[in-house]
Amino acid sequence: MTTNTQIPTLDGKDSMPAYVASPARTPRAAIIVIQEIFGVNPGIRKKADDWAARGYLAVAPDVFWRQKPGVEFDADIPEQFQEAIGYMMKHDFDLGIRDVEATIHWIRRQQGVAKVGLVGFCMGGKVAYMAATRTDVNAAVGYYGVGIDQMLNESHAIANPLMLHVPTADGFVPAEAQKAVHEGLDGNPHVTIHDYEGLDHGFAAEHGVRRNVEAAELADRRTAEFFEKHLA
């Protein structure tokens, strides 16, 4: 089953599907997992399960639910890759960040977990940046976020720790965009940026040909240590 929980929207008029993985004991904190363009697929569910195994309440909302609930794609199938891009192009990121805010509220108010982190991949990496600028999430991590260079005017609003993982050969984030991100954020004391030389977009995917095991393990270790520090 892709999702197993319904989370109320901010206005209470609807609810969004989410995959929730709970730890065996009282959660040490919560982590919201924001999908790539491929939906809450097996890779995203595995990431949520892994966080739960570390003692966190993990919540992966279905980002495209307003278009069509439950869409799920395989990045290694070209036709599905293109279909996923179509969903991303139609996604309302401003409305989506309100869904993130609703998820934060649900975790704190309904689940009783005060500290909330967020980790996002691809389009979710952009959402991680937006969460850092527009919500009170306690800590956020973005993997190969696309379009952050177009939102640097919001960087003054970052009040909590943000970590970005940037592969330098990202086919979706050209060198000039990466340069702009560094120039815009390197001086911000809340922001940490890690570059991964020669790697491409999607290197930390759980499944498929995009994964680079060594780099994925390094980035995931950095992320785990980051959350251990800032969600304690």
Image: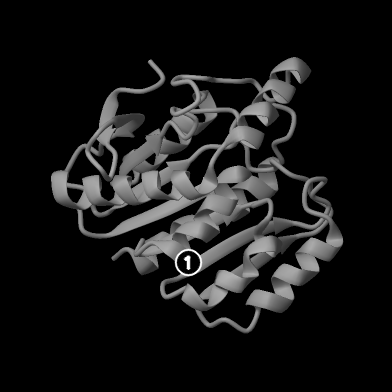
The number of callouts visible is 1
Q: What residue is disc 1 on?
A: 133
Measuring from the top left, give residue 142's x and y in whole percent.
56, 55
The image quarter in which residue 76 lies: top right
Quadrant of res 195: bottom right
Quarter of the image where one finds residue 14: top left
Above or below — where is 104 with respect to 230? above
The picture places residue 229, in percent across and down from the top left corner, at 38, 68
How is this picture coloured? one colour
On-image quarter of the C terminus: bottom left
Q: Is residue 104 above or below residue 75?
A: below
Residue at 74% across / 24% down in the picture? 82
Residue 6 position within the rendered picture, expressed as x and y whole percent measured from the top left? 27, 28
On the picture, is 15 further left or further right than 97? left
**Above or below, comparing residue 91 to residue 142 in the picture:** above
Q: Residues within 10 Å of mark 1 (few under 14, many from 20)?
A: many
Q: Is residue 60 above or below residue 136?
A: above
The answer to whether residue 202 is left or right of residue 229 is right
Q: Is residue 225 visible?
A: no
Residue at 40% across, 60% down: 227
Element type where label 1 sits in the image? helix
Q: Position of residue 33 (x, y in %)?
A: 44, 43
State left or right for residue 78 relative to residue 122. Answer: right
The kind of residue tagged 1 is Thr
Give the residue drawn at x 68%, y 76%: 184
For the N terminus, which image quadrant? top left
Of residue 184 and residue 200, the one placed in the foreground of this image is 184
**Front residue of this view, candidates 135 and 119:** 135
The answer to whether one can see residue 139 in this image is yes
